[in-house]
Amino acid sequence: MYVFTILAVNLFIGVSLQTPTKYQNVNQMIEYINSVQNEWIADKTFDDNYKLSDLKVKLSTLPVKKGVLQIKPKSEYPNIDIPKSFDSRHQWPECQSIKEIRDQGNCGSCWAFAVVEAISDRICIASKSKQQVEISAENLVACCTSCGDGCHGGFEDAAWQYYVKHGLVTGGLYNSHKGCQPYSLAACEHHTTGHYPPCGKTMDPTPKCHQKCATGYNVSYTHDLHFGSKAYDVDSDVEAIQTEIMTNGPVSAGFSVYEDFLTYKSGVYHHVTGSGVGGHAVKVIGWGVENGVDYWLVANSWNEDWGDKGLFKIKRGTNECNFESGISAGLPKLN
């Protein structure tokens, strides 16, 4: 089972993994998952050099609300017909950021990635694709002290609020040389085997906060800032979440993660077995139905080698793993 170490009261969780008594290795867990249900497929996507006790996952977002944002009431949503399935990539095909799968590297910055990814998408959507930007995860992780502790965890709600109050600059992936502050931490394999090196067993240090742009970028830090006009939590009602996505674009979600999620390969995930390992944050881009099971379509930040090309589906309508209780969003103030 996992042992939880509280690093700050009601804020962060540090995780160390020990072999569960029920399973001697990952293969036994995977065999059990696939034998008791057929809604999703578990797979060992890493090689035999990995042991169950070695697997570390950068889960540093708690799905518990911090209370900094108000919930957007259902009464504020328009009365629209909600389709059986919806995919933001197809609804707004000109917005390249929606299609991108990012990588948080060896850093517990999922909370920041989920938010900046949704912000990037929403700027494109609100501007009718005239503004195509990648908002910088580096800037948010490094500079938002009110959000938490950088690579050691943070809150999505506070990140959305920071976007409104202080603004965020642009910045692409590691080594992309795009935007004001590209991500400074290299991509790595999150308990998968692929073309990146494996993530380390200890997190990288949080990048330093710099209020300046990378050398060669021809826009000043101040002029590159993008601000939000509003930040809010979304009601846990399924139709409210769907309407929010259809109206304004992808949202961020914080949820509880269990050991079996680390083995996800395809299908509609729901918790089957294993201990809780912490909180994680992701971007929700749509929904659908697969083999009669309603699901949310979600983009992770563990690169395209993880899961279903970087995506996963999770059961919709039952608040699976507290997923529907942890939805946050905001609106951009267009430049």
Image (cartoon, rainbow, N blue to C red):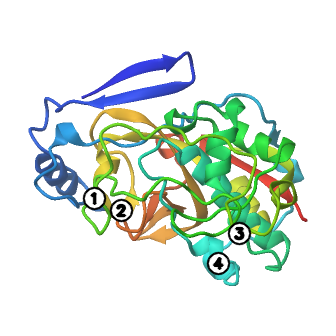
Residue 177: tell me if it is visible: yes
Give the residue at x 56% y 57%.
183
What separation in Å lies between label 1 and label 3 (alpha carbons)? 36 Å
Q: Which mark is residue 42?
A: none
Residue 104, position as x, y percentages in the image? 49, 53
The reply to whether dot 4 and dot 2 touch (C-beta < 8 Å) is no
Q: Residues within 10 Å of mark 3 (few under 14, many from 20)?
A: few
The reply, left or right, for residue 307 in relation to residue 151 is left
Q: Is residue 282 above or below residue 177?
A: above
- The structure residue drawn at horizontal position 70% and vertical position 37%, both measured from the top left corner, is 144
Query: Disc 3 marks which residue?
Result: 82
Q: Amino acid type of disc 3?
A: Ile
Lower sequence index among marks 4 and 2: 4
N-terminal of the two: label 1 or label 3?
A: 3
In the rendering, at what x and y percent does residue 114 appear?
Answer: 60, 53
Q: Are marks 2 and 1 in contact (CB under 8 Å)?
A: yes
* Relative to 184, residue 3 above or below: above
Which circle marks residue 306 in the picture? 2
Q: Earlier in the sequence, mark 2 or mark 3?
A: 3
> Can residue 84 be seen in the rendering of this structure?
no
CA separation, marks 2 and 1? 6 Å
| Residue type at tag 1 | Thr
Q: Which residue is disc 1 drawn over?
A: 192
- Amino acid type indicated by mark 4: Gln
How far from the left and from the top, in percent, is residue 283?
Answer: 58, 57
Q: Residue at x 67, y 60 (%)?
A: 214
Q: CA distance from mark 2 to mark 3?
A: 30 Å
What is the quadrant of residue 313 in the picture? bottom left
